[in-house]
Amino acid sequence: MDNLYFYMIIALGVLAIVDLIVGVSNDAVNFLNSAIGSKAVSMRTILIVASVGVALGAIFSSGMMEVARKGIFNPEMLMFSDIMIIFMAVMITDILLLDFFNTIGMPTSTTVSIVFELLGAAVAMALIKISIVDGHFSDVVNYINTSKATEIIVGILLSVVIAFTVGMLVQYVARLLLSFNFEKKATWIGALFGGIGLTSIIYFILLKGIKDTGFAAENYDFLGGMTISHFLEKFAMLIILLNLAFWFAISYILMSFFKVNVYKIIILAGTFGLALAFAGNDLVNFIGVPIAAYQSYEVWSVSGIPATEFGMGFLADKVPTPTILLFLSGIVMVLTLWFSKKARYVTQTEINLSREGSSKERFQPNFLSRSLVKSTKAVSKYFLIKTPKPVLDVIEKQFEKPAFEFNSDKTQNLPAFDYIRASVNLMVASVLIAVATSYKLPLSTTYVTFMVAMGSSLSDRAWGSESAVYRVAGVLNVIGGWFFTAFIAFVSAALMAYLIYSGGNTMIIVLLVIAAILIFRNSMLYLKKSRQIPEEDSLSSTQESSFQGVVEETGKNISKVFKRVNKIEENTIDGLINQDIKTLEKAKKTVGKLEVEIEDLQNNIFYFIKNLQESSVNASTFYINVIGELQDITQSVGFINKISHKHIKNHHSSLKKNQAKELIDIQKKLEVIFSEVEDLFNTMSFYKIQGLNHDIRLLLQEVSKCAQMQVERTRTTESSPKNATLYFNILLEIEDMLKSTMNLLDLNSQHN
């Protein structure tokens, strides 16, 4: 039995490393996004600065490990065997939960997850112990620190409301004073902004990144015998004023004499500060539980007392964390920061939601997002009416955005937002977290940084009428995910604890294997998803500005569409005739991807027209018509697949022999025509258009003939209305595809 706990400690050590990796992948969004989104410096520089912050924060985080030992449950009420079950349940749940959020690219709070996992597992163990002694349910409060869970829930609400509101107001004022042409403002204005920004960030580093670390609690002679924590609290205002004067002077000198961009310095300092605070305060979320388990095992193993009888009251005392463990944790975190692709995927969610202008929207609007946008527009309209026109003119001038060349490719590579918004995001997040720390308010780092970014985006008019419902829906999805985290963490950890208690070491092995399989599966799914983008036959938006260039680029897309439509049609007809639902589902997924890509081409039309040469404006009509015909063809093949899939899924009778034979004949001729169209546009052999049109007309006549024969069968021998309806619909859609194909050929014939 003793060996069981030894192996559990080893397993918890391995889980700690995995948890560090998935945890950093999730929380990197907190300190990387402002720098990445603004493109203030290179990605390499951002990662170097963040890595230094993470490494230092990890080394000095010893004082933050108490929450895992006594923050959620009362250790004196539990035995060593109980504690180990709780810790094992928590770690397995935490890894699975964070990996799930990373895989879908959604940022969540590691603090909330670990707290509610500890709470859920502890409640489960408390109920088990109470049931053994026939106690009352109300006795659970003797085991649980209920105030901590209440603090976290309040923290969620405070973080969301306060961070969003303050971020919105500060960004509005900053933009009103500095405008989008902030680099042309007087030097003293930039220096003042730099002084305020750097002061807030430095104060945040002192208060949040250093104040709660182990060495900050020691007394120092040069501080008059005070601790660093006490000194920071006692002279807070003096420290702020001195910092403001110092950094204003430094910023002014750098801007005036060395032509240094002070906004970049603010962004890098903020990135370092948030990375330092993240590692210093959130490291407990990843290794606090394994370290507490290891320290518990050390004390128990020399006691000679059975695990079921050894009380854990000593966990209530302050126990230092070995520096070597903190150092190793820091290394794992830094390596994850550099090499985790999932970390970059999570950052994309926040950056895209706060991006200036249009982007490919990831979230679909819902009733709530539409209602919020509608009510906000109504309130905005009211204030616009009540505000004097001269005041409105001044405000509008400050919010005028600099013009840039409308090129889709260049637009994609533009920064998501400028230096002002990036600086405000970091400044406001730093100040709010620092103030909350000084007043011991439970604000979440993840919630603050995310909601500040969303608030600043709204006031900066990044959420226009074309994107607002999508962005609001995205924010609501993320916020909903936060509450979901708390609920699922509590329930899952409680279930894990019960299973481990009931199944013993066998259940631990089973759960670890299941966890490993799920993480491996998620990783494979993520890799598969990330590799779907650069497919050989994927469509690409044209960057050509001349008419001939547009025709050639469009021809490549037409060729790719017909190649894919040909395969979809073949699989659909084959799946329908053979009643093979898997083949139909495969075709359904393929047509879904094709529809999305064609929709992206449509969304690119605005930038395409803007980028055209003056002498090639007529190409816009050609391009729009081509995209329209391609969409019609895709919709037709998609509809054929949809009705065929529905027919087979509902177990309707198969097609009659004569129907199947006619459909196969049509399909073979359609396959030949689509292959010839693909080859025509691939080789730009437009001289073949006339012959192809002739073949298409012949096939149209055959389709019409088949429809007429089905009419006769329906009047005489047909007994299945479902079959007749399906067959007619397929023939009509094939007819539409052929007519759209002829339109495409005629469009290209006119310009070649």
Image (tube, helix red, strand yellow):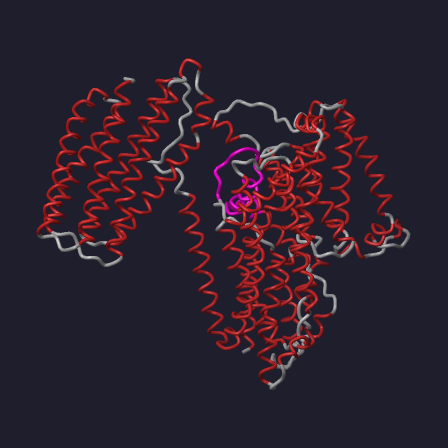
Left or right for 292, reference 530 = right
Quarter of the image where one finds residue 124: bottom right
Up/down of 48 relative to 113, above or below: above
Tell which residue pokes out farthest to the bottom in this image.
134
Tell me which secondary structure the magenta stretch mostly adopts: helix
Q: Position of residue 95 (x, y in %)?
A: 53, 59
330 or 356, which lies in front? 356
Q: Name the residue: 76% across, 41% down.
A: 200
Tell which residue pokes out farthest to the right in this image.
224
For the N terminus, the quadrant is: bottom right
Up/down of 174 relative to 648, above or below: above
Tell which residue pokes out farthest to the left in this image.
716
Up/down of 693 relative to 598, above or below: above
185 or 121, which lies in front? 185
Is residue 349 inside the magenta stretch?
yes
Up/down of 677 relative to 447, above or below: above
Quarter of the image where one finds residue 69: bottom right
Magenta segment: 335-362
458 or 135, which lies in front? 458
Quarter of the image where one finds residue 633: top left
Left or right for 285, reference 618 = right
Q: Name the residue: 77% across, 52% down.
A: 211
